[in-house]
Image: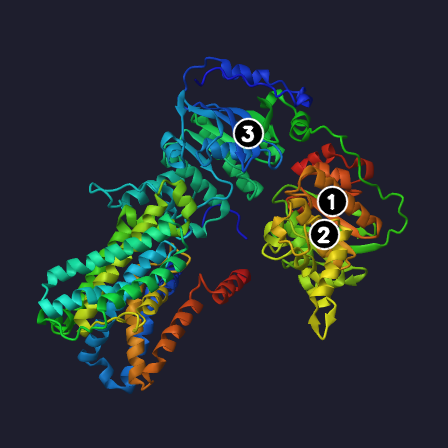
Amino acid sequence: MSQAHRHRTPADQPDTSTITVDAYGERLMSTSPPASTRYVASHVSKAFNGAPVLHDVSAVLEPGEVHSLVGENGAGKSTLFKIMSGLYRPDAGELALGGERLADLTPRGALQKGVYLVPQEPTLMAHLSAAENLYVGALPHRRMPFIVDWSRIHREAATYFERVGLDIDVETPARQLSIAQQQLLECARALVHNCRVIMFDEPTSPLTSHETEILFDLMRVLRGEGLALGFISHRLDEVFEVSDHLTVLRDGRMVASAGRDEITRDQLVTAMIGRPIGVRTRVRRTSDVTDRREVLKVEGLSSRPTFEDVSFVLTKHEVAGLAGLVGSGRTEIAETIFGLRKADHGEVWLDGEPLEHRTPRRCIDAGLVYLPEDRGRNGIFSDVDLARNVTAGIVPRLPLRWHLISTAREEAVARDSAARTSVRAASLGASISTLSGGNQQRAMFSRWLLAEPRVAIFDEPTRGVDIGAKDDIYDIISDLATSGLACLIISSDLEELALTCDRVLVIYEGRIVGEVRDEDVTTARLGELVVGGGRG
Amino acid sequence: MSTTLSVEKTEPGGAILRDVLRKAIRLRELQLVVAIAVVVAASAVAHPNFISPGNISFMLADSVVTAVLATGQTIVVLAKGIDLSVAPILGIAAVVVGFPAQNHNLPIVAALGLVVLVGLVLGVGNGLFVSVTRIPPIIATLATLSVYGGLQFIIANGQEVVNIPNAYDALGNNDVVSGIPWVLVIGVGIAVVVALFLRHTNVGRAIYAVGNNAGAAHRSGIPVQRVIFATYVVSGVLAGIAGLLYLCHTGSADSTTGTDSNVNLTSIAATLIGGTTLTGGRGGVVGSVIGAVFLSVALTAMVFARIPAIWEPAGVGLLILLAMVTDRHSSNLTARARRHRQGST
């Protein structure tokens, strides 16, 4: 049953020795008084479409404690909370609340058992009142069943709002609430259902620091009342400020778990990103290149509240990186440079010429291309063949015959370009969706090379690409830079940036907070900076 | 931009009044009543007959069939669906009771039972396609529009209902008290019951919740697909009842009843004009009923203004567009104006 689940250190994760897992194992073993709200997840595993997301992870949410999950993007933190709140079903492992095993947990069942997940994005009913949102799905009724008791809802909602410090009219439509207010409302919702376990999935990422403090105050109050709280955040300052216990996940495995005072910040960062480094060698350095003409200049670019005052320069032959957490504004900066979003302020210069009234078309024609992050949605035309996908960016420039696009000439252009990035496909007429992720990405590279760019922004260039193909893509980028292209790589994979970039700019909450170059570009240094460690 | 967690504090005196007024002006129902008043006033100036008791009674009675259909349509649209098959459901109901009424003097109570049954069965059909097989509602009901329309042809078999018993005619055209037709009482009764249902029952609130955010509704323990299923059944039943009212009001039914007068469009038009949004979760039947009255008044005004009847469909379409443009949630135009206002304060 639920007692005695000693966490085993995975044998293939040798570099976590700095933190002992034993302390936590003891906690699991100890025969503490049967607190009714102790929520134990033991040996949970989960895979999506065959890709493992969680592997043998255990965690205990103790009453009167804030337990934080820490890890990089894709480490499995949200997945664990979603399993614990019944949104996902685990492939293996079990959940136990106060000693009672919870099998086949559904969101409804979790709510009834007193487990609530405050989701990453509050999911309120925009057109319903704040009070109704509080009770939705379980509206109290009058003596006659099914007849909703509105006066009771409005009366009681007011007391719950007061308890969480939400000063609003109970009939305010949810769409008029700020994100912070919506989160407090979600907390109140948990209290309405008498929840004893509340998990917060990255609640602070959209909040200002003032709002964050209000949320933390509430969390402390709830902790004081004996609730068991779970917390996810990318900001290590916050994690240390509010947590009693920390569990670090990496690539779906639990690599460390310790009380707040038993672990240092450095140990935490090492555990988070500490993948064995040095397996792959740096792809290239451009310090030997002499032609360092400035190609792209971005000055004071702002699009509040997403990012502010972003300035940098890219030179010929350079591979620069843009590091930052999801939500830090990296992609938005690239999209603004490329004219997909409007800037409030700031200018972009290409080869000394200002690039004004930017639209994707103008940027492409001027020699600036952008490889979007979500290849499936913004990159490939999935119903169309490879040739048409390759030429899609330069349709107005295709060789014409009698003023019409000549299929033969178009395919000749596509063939040459696809060969440059060694796309492997049965034929040019093959549907692009039949190609592997790596080959699709190569096709995207060949599309943008046709535009003969001088600057290329690659957003997550190796997402959804297998390991072998990754190296090929790094080689392509390296070759492009050697031939003079200025590249900007946006990536969540710090190792990738460390491997490919000569220089990395670090974005934190919409601002450039640091720049590292050459030998200083290491995953450890980047890891520190992206979580806000570069300040002060 | 404000970052505090409290909404602006209440201001004294005149500010509150101004606030209430501003809210009232935004109310779709009130906007429509004003629009109706304007159309009525303008037409009355040009043609005093427009406000004769006879014409008012005619316009109201004329709007009842649309109002009942729109009531069902509203329920479906609130849950983010759409029902394009109300026209043939109305038509099938009309011919299914029309022939036995004409030929065998079917009692009106039996007729009511029959149209409810017809609506129920056809509504269940729609509900199954949408909520069980998960075909997008616009496709599912477009298909059943054709299927049910074909059934109507088969059932009518080229015959026409031209003669209905007195009891039917009385229901369709007589007044309860002078100036208030029976159909109006029935229509208002249905609208009131549905409005109360939507506001004051768990199922009614679940419909709003599903339309607002089906994912969150599921997370809150609402049986989303069952709720969606129910909306199509209710819409079918109300379309069936509308079929009986249509038969009683016009005294005729044939293989193209409903489809030929384009009640699909008018039911959706009344719903949208009444402020219910196709994005789901916002609006209500009161607006739809007033929307139906507005349509009837506006179209009658067109007749009085001697605009040829062939312009009627174009008029309905323009009214839908007008309603969308003036809707502050769906229209880009008004949204931009609002942002501008907020930016300048």
What label does residue B113 carry, if any? none
| Residue carrying label 1 | A473
Coordinates of residue A514 in the picture (x, y in percent): 74, 41
Specify the amino acid type for callout 1. Answer: Ile
User: Which comes sooner in the sequence, label 1 or label 2?
Assistant: 2
| Residue at (72% x, 58% y) in the render | A414
Chain letter of the residue carrying label 3: A
Can residue B52 be spotted in the picture?
yes
Q: Decide: marks 1, 2 in contact (CB < 8 A)? A: yes
- Tell which residue pokes out farthest to the top in this image: A31
User: How far apart are the two marked residues, 1 and 2, measured between alpha carbons?
Assistant: 9 Å
Left of A337 or right of it: where is B314? Answer: left
Specify the amino acid type for callout 3. Answer: Ser
Nearer the observer, A209 or A413: A413
User: How far apart are the two marked residues, 2 and 3, measured between alpha carbons?
Assistant: 40 Å
Nearer the observer, A11 or A141: A11
Same-chain status of marks 1 and 2: yes
Chain letter of the residue carrying label 1: A
Specify the amino acid type for callout 2. Answer: Phe
Chain letter of the residue carrying label 2: A
Left of A395 or right of it: where is B305? Answer: left
User: Which comes sooner in the sequence, label 3 or label 1?
Assistant: 3
| Residue carrying label 3 | A68
In the image, residue B48 sits, relative to residue B249, either above or below, namely: below
| Residue carrying label 2 | A445
Coordinates of residue B321 in the picture (x, y in percent): 42, 71
Nearer the observer, A268 or A461: A461
User: Which comes sooner in the sequence, label 2 or label 3?
Assistant: 3
